[in-house]
Amino acid sequence: MNLQKKIFTSYSIIIISIIIFSFLIFYGYTYKNIEENAIKHLISINQLNKDQLDTLFRDMDKMALQIIANPSIQEVFKDAKRDSSPEDYFTHSYENRLQTIATLTSINGPNIFAHRISIYNDRGDFISTGVLPDSQVYIHNQMQKNQYREWYAHMLSLDGKRHLSPPTIDPWNRQRQKILFSLSRELRDVNFSYGIVEIQLPYDVIANIFEDYEDDGRKHYLLTPSSQMAYPYEQNTTNYSVHMDYYMKQVPNGQTEGFYNTTNPVTGVKEVVAFSTSSISQWLLFSVQPMDTLLAPIQYMGLILLIIGCALIIAALALISIITNHLTSPLKQLRTSINDISFKNLSIEMDENYYNNELQLLNESFNKMLQRLEKSMDEVVELKTSEMRSHILALQSQMNPHFLYNTLAVINAAAIEEDYCKISKMCSKLSNILRYTSAFDDDTVTLEDEYRNAVNYMTLMKDRFEDQLEYSFAIDPSLNQIPIPKLVLQPLLENCFSHGFRNKRPPWHVYINIGVKKNRWYITVEDNGCGFDEDKLKIIQDELNAFYNHPKNSLTQLSIGGLALLNTLIRLQFYYKNDMIFKVETEKHEGTKITIGGPLHEHKSVNR
């Protein structure tokens, strides 16, 4: 890493750290404030809904008390209590019936606050105003049920206190199936009880209070002191029983309002729950909102901060880059001058605009050093040049001349036919092969590189022999990055043409399969040539044995440019020892199948 990059990296790390640290502090502070405000907002919604419910219940209770305190209604129901007739009092006391209905209608007001106002007693006398009830027979039957009698006795036990009933299907009208909730009080004087006053309102009145505030995933639940669901109304409350039991258990003992964080026992979603208790009905109201929607503004703010932070970092990096470039420009000039040093120019020239005392001293030191090294450099350059030439010539001399000559002959013929596109492709593939075989920086490659070189070779062979040759490749893609010795596949392909097809009439077929089996890679080359005879196989095996017994005498065959089959086998033995795979399957005049391979683990490269 050069000096400019070091300075740039150091200052960048410092500036980026300061920006990130500052934004984290700001985000943490803002996160806390937004979270507190969001929870306060949820609590305020809960309190607002509770206050609206209390106002509604007070209005209902006020209407019930107004009815109870009405003298005419009291006199009518006192008279009904003294009536000895087994029938409904209001069926034969028509004048009192009209008077009572008129009074109830007047109390209900022109806006018709109540859905229905009913007054009834334990004798079966029933009168109402508002939405008409069912038939007299149906009402009489309802009053005879044990459920009604138990409820009536419960009302008497309250000693005149109000009673709120949760939403239920209208008990006085079986046809409309209207969902109503009601407030009831006992009609009585100091000594006697004369009946029950019931104010009924539609369930929609409660629903409208909550539905206006059910957004962003927010939900409201209203429970009676007996844990009966009042909102939302469900005939089957099984779906809510687990939620409600869990929410109620989380409420601290003796606390009538507040909030807490919890995890929904059914969905597993983190939630914030605000709760409060109605002072009128003692009903418990829960306002529940998922944490992710409650804190959505924080997520949006975090995104904005991230964008601003990234913009600041980019701007800071640009500024640091400009500053470091200006500071290191003299050093770059010095480096450029040093790179321009040659035998003809053994001095350093600097732009006067960049001169300062330190660089001038450094320039003089370099010039003195160059003068002292001039003679030794001449010798080193000459030695390196000779060495490079020798190595390149050695590699070039090891290439198969027949392949080059035949390829050039095909290129010449193609040029005569003016097939320029074909010439370009052939030259490109030939260039790739020459570059691949002549590279001496390392003696290992990936299976993918070896495969591509083999494809180039077979394509050129196809251009040469045209319809006389057919070939195919099959490779397992998972083996692409497996390291193997360089140039182990091309010699097998060359063997097909130099030996297998020498005395074999076309068409010729070559099949190449690259795969893995039992944690070993393998390459199989199969042709339909004339096959190996026993003598040729024995010669190859004897040469391999000679290398096993006297490896130093065979090291000269290990250069990458040597493309003989024996060379390939020796190098495989050198890399993999006894783990090498080598198998020849041949039948005379029927073709040859050669398989080579080795273990999948990486091997160490051999330095020449």
Image (cartoon, rainbow, N blue to C red):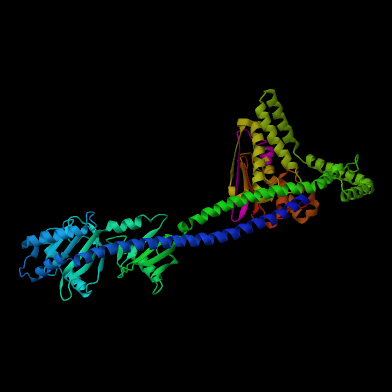
Give the side of residue 291 with respect to residue 554, left or right. Answer: left
Taking the view exactly as shown, the residue that stands out farthest to the front is 71
Provide residue 397's location: percent of width, then percent of height.
79, 40
Report how many numbered discs are placed on residues in the image.
0
- The residue sitting at 46% across, 58% down in the picture is 294
Q: Residue at x 78, y 41 (%)?
A: 398
Query: In the displayed structure, would residue 522 be above or below residue 201?
Result: above
Q: From this viewpoint, which residue is outermost toward the bottom?
A: 191
Q: Nearer the viewer, residue 547 or 253?
A: 253
> Image check: 557 left or right of 148?
right
x then y, percent, for residue 483? 67, 51
Residue 367 visible (yes or no): yes
Question: In the depicted view, which residue is nearer to us: 246 or 560?
Answer: 246
Q: Quadrant of residue 536?
A: top right
Residue 10 location, quadrant: bottom right
Q: Position of residue 524 (x, y in %)?
A: 62, 46
In magenta stretch: residue 513: yes
Q: Which residues are magenta?
A: 494-521
**Among the 4 quarters of the image, the one containing residue 343:** top right
Which residue is found at the position 55% from the left and 55% from the top? 302
